[in-house]
Image (cartoon, rainbow, N blue to C red):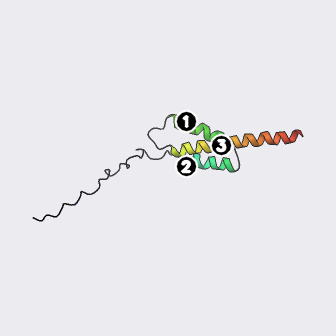
Amino acid sequence: MSDAPTPPPPPSFPPAGQPPMGMPAGGEHPKAQTLFIASIVGLLCCAPVNIWVLLQANGILAAPGGLDVSKVKTAKTIAIVSLALWAVGLVVRLGFMRN
């Protein structure tokens, strides 16, 4: 036998069909992409759409069911910011109308 050290074992991977560590087991929520796109549309042109986004996101976040809801959280944040900007713009516009 030689005195050469034995090589380390290969890295272990999760079994096929299982997500890597740190990833949710169920994948992304099916409505996540729709809510994300709707929140961006609401931010750009139609803020009241984000009321629907908030209602849907709150329902999903109340019972995530083991799915990845990070995109839903992002959509909810965009919706809140959009509605806040819309409200500020409305107040400013009404303020200018009084003069």
Question: In the image, what residue occupies the spot 49% across and 35% down?
Answer: 63
Q: Secondary structure at mark 2?
A: helix
Q: Residue 93: where, in percent of width, then height?
A: 81, 42
Q: Residue 25: where, in percent of width, then height?
A: 40, 44
**Residue corresponding to mark 1:** 59
Give the residue type that dot 1 points to.
Gly
Report, in whole angstroms, how far the alpha carbon at label 2 lies from the one at label 3.
18 Å
Give the mark, 2 or 1, whose residue is nearer the N terminus.
Answer: 2
Q: Secondary structure at mark 3?
A: helix
- In the rendered image, the residue lying farthest to the right is 99
- In the rendered image, the residue lying farthest to the left is 1
Give the mark, 3 or 1, whose residue is nearer the N terminus.
Answer: 1
Give the mark, 2 or 3, whose residue is nearer the N terminus.
Answer: 2
Where, quadrant-wise, is the N terminus in this rendering? bottom left
Disc 2 residue crowd, few under 14, some 14–19, many 20+, Cα 10 Å = some
Give the residue type that dot 3 points to.
Val
Q: Residue 27: where, in percent of width, then height?
A: 44, 47
Q: Secondary structure at mark 1?
A: helix
**Residue corresponding to mark 2:** 33
Q: Residue 83: name its quadrant.
A: top right
- Disc nearest the viewer among 3 and 1: 3
Question: In the image, what residue occupies the spot 52% across and 37% down?
Answer: 61
Q: Is residue 13 above or below residue 67?
A: below
Q: Is residue 48 visible?
A: no
Q: Is residue 65 above or below residue 41?
A: above
Q: Is residue 63 left or right of residue 98?
A: left
Give the residue type that dot 2 points to.
Gln
**Residue corresponding to mark 3:** 81
Where, quadrant-wise, is the C terminus in this rendering? top right
- In the rendered image, the residue lying farthest to the bottom is 2
Total numbered labels: 3
Q: Residue 36: where, in percent of width, then height?
A: 58, 48
